[in-house]
Image (cartoon, grey):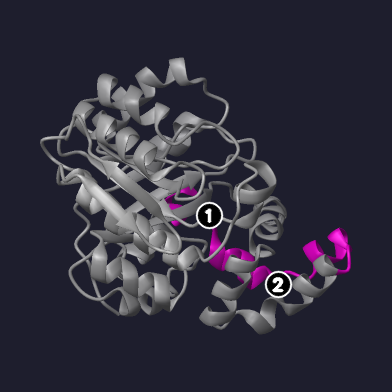
Amino acid sequence: MTTAPQARFGITIPFEGVSLQDHQRWFHELVELGYTDVWSGEVDGNDGFTPLALAAAWAPTLNLGVAIAPVFTRGPALLAQTAASIAEAAPGRFALGIGASSEVIVERWNSMVYADPYYRVRDTVRFLHAAFAGEKVDFESPRLSVKGFRLARVPETPPKIYLAALRPGMLALAGRETDGAILNWLSATDVEKAVAEIGPGKEVVARIFVCPTEDAELARSVGRRMITAYLNVEGYAEFHRWLGRGPQLEAMWAAWAAGDRKGALAAIPNEVVDELIVHGSLAECRAHVARYVAHGVTVPMPALVLAGGDLGEAVRGLAPNQ
């Protein structure tokens, strides 16, 4: 087991059930509680950048990150412009997390072609490095074509680029060409396998789903629904086969493919839920998150899954200052 220093501790925003305009007081409280980072996402709720723009204005000491902005759903120039704008608003405090996302988000929801995700991500990383350096970019590859683009407002401190990665190819790409990797949907003990592919000296950010309740059956019921929603996506399924969890999940995948949703839920073993969804008392949740750090995560960013619990208690109970 490798031990990583825990200099930073983040949390996923925006909080469920709290409007963006009401996040100002939460950002202030996060700072008081010792949180160093806020990380947004971009799936089917808010976009990844607007919550960070608010945090830049309302809490000017927090580090900001988007995990992740899909490389397919914005053109490369617009992605560079958006990231540069947040970097200008929060100098030295913004990290751009990018990744391939999924066919569901790219094709079904955004009517774009999801093809050659590894190469599209790689080429986008290379384009962004050139754009953030203020270069006039002419970039041509089978997956990406940019002709004569130059950022008119180059941020004084370019944003760090982190890469969402699941399997060896993308993890190694994160280690070679970016500032770090973003991990998701893995257990604390899975982290070391991912870190070995990334290599030394890189930031490792992890979104960790935390359901703070001592009702284990409730947490497992919520967790099973989340697992079926994500781990039936091809990329995540292959990720868990690579991690060695295939035998435990084959029955779920088979039931899901057959259209048996209830059977798929029932087929997920308790031990899989307990590995992927942190639950228990707040003290137990803190200890479980700490295991991710012990295995190599440098920036944990818990995503709160409130099963009837109180948001304030959860935020305070997980805080670094506890």
Q: Which residues are magenta?
A: 258-285
Disc ID at residue 269: 2
Q: Is residue 282 magenta?
A: yes
Q: Is residue 34 above or below residue 9?
A: above
C-alpha separation, residue under disc 1 versus residue under disc 2: 27 Å
Tell me if 173 is positioned left or right of 267 in this view.
left
Per the rendering, the mark at residue 101 is 1
Quarter where residue 279 is shown: bottom right
Between tags 1 and 2, which lies in front? 1
Element assignment for label 2: loop
Q: Amino acid at mark 2?
A: Pro
160 in the magenta segment: no
Image quarter hosting the N terminus: bottom left
Q: How far across and how far down the image is residue 281, in percent? A: 51, 50
Which circle's residue, 1 or 2, is located before the other in the chain?
Answer: 1
Residue 183 shows in this picture: no
Residue 54 location (% of width, % of height): 34, 22
Relative to the observer, which residue lies in front, 319 or 265?
A: 265
Residue 235 appears in which quarter of the rendering?
bottom right
Magenta residues, dominant SS class: helix
Image spot of residue 285 (x, y percent): 46, 54
Asked if residue 244 is positioned above or below residue 71 in the image, the reply reads below
Residue 230 shows in the view = yes
Looking at the image, which residue is at 36% across and 76% down? Answer: 192
The local crowd at label 2, few if under 14, some if 14 to 19, many if 20 or more residues have their Cα within 10 Å, is: some
Amino acid at the residue labelled 1: Ser
Q: Closest to the observer: 287 or 300?
A: 300
User: SS for tag 1?
Assistant: loop
In this figure, what is the number of numbered marks? 2
- Name the residue located 52 percent from the left edge and 62 percent from the top edge: 185
Mark 1 neighbour density, 10 Å: few (under 14) some (14–19) many (20 or more): many
